[in-house]
Image (cartoon, rainbow, N blue to C red):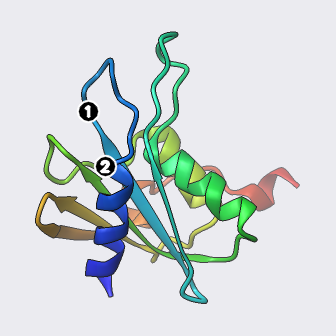
Amino acid sequence: MSHDLFEAARAAMAKAYAPYSKFPVGAALRTEDGRVFAGANIEVASYPEGWCAETTALGHYIMGGGGRITEIAVVAERMAKCSPCGGCRQRLAEFCRPETKLYLCDNGGVVETVTMGLMLPYGFQGDILK
């Protein structure tokens, strides 16, 4: 199952708008009902006001009805095992469980599988804020 999520992330990466950093990134999320939402990073001239691939994917996911995220794949053209930045880890954690799989990829596929709990062990929990 992880390879098709990698393919979705790679296809999204091909649509990245990264004229300043020249660092295209793609991300794809799978919900527990099997839907896949992908996104690419988008930069603007007013650095750092662009947004990450994971944030774009989350936007599609929310607009598509949301649900529990069970798997995430991230791929960057020029960096093997590119992981979500700190802000994206927290954004993703809002819709995941600690055991949600995060696939770190290179240009050929999944290189390493970790969990969101490992990537963000002390993230904010929304239920505390309610």
Q: Where is residue 80 in the image (x, y as percent from the top left)?
A: 13, 51
Helix, strand or loop status at disc 1: loop
Question: Looking at the image, which residue is at 38% across and 41% down?
Answer: 16
**Looking at the rendered structure, which numbered label has been put on residue 94?**
none
Residue 90 appearing in the image: no
Q: How many marks?
A: 2
Q: Estimate how packed mark 1 is, as few (under 14), some (14 to 19) or many (20 or more) residues with alpha carbons within 10 Å.
A: some
- As measured in the structure, the alpha-carbon distance from the residue carrying label 2 to the one carrying label 1 is 11 Å
Select label 2 or label 1 by which is in front: 2
Q: Where is residue 129 in the image (x, y as percent from the top left)?
A: 82, 50
Answer left or right for 130 relative to 30: right
The amino acid type found where label 2 is placed reads Ala
If you read the primary sequence from the N terminus, does the residue marked by circle 2 or circle 1 appear first? Answer: 2
Residue for badge 1:
23
Q: Where is residue 112 in the image (x, y as percent from the top left)?
A: 18, 68
Residue 97 appearing in the image: yes
Residue for badge 2:
14
Answer left or right for 120 relative to 31: left
For the N terminus, which image quadrant?
A: bottom left
Query: Quick one: 23 or 81, which is closer to the camera?
Result: 23
Q: Quadrant of residue 66?
A: bottom right
Q: Quadrant of residue 21?
A: top left
Residue found at the far front of this picture? 15
For the C terminus, which image quadrant?
A: bottom right
Q: Where is residue 23 in the image (x, y as percent from the top left)?
A: 26, 32
Residue found at the far top of this picture? 46
The answer to whether 22 is drawn above or below residue 127 in the figure is above
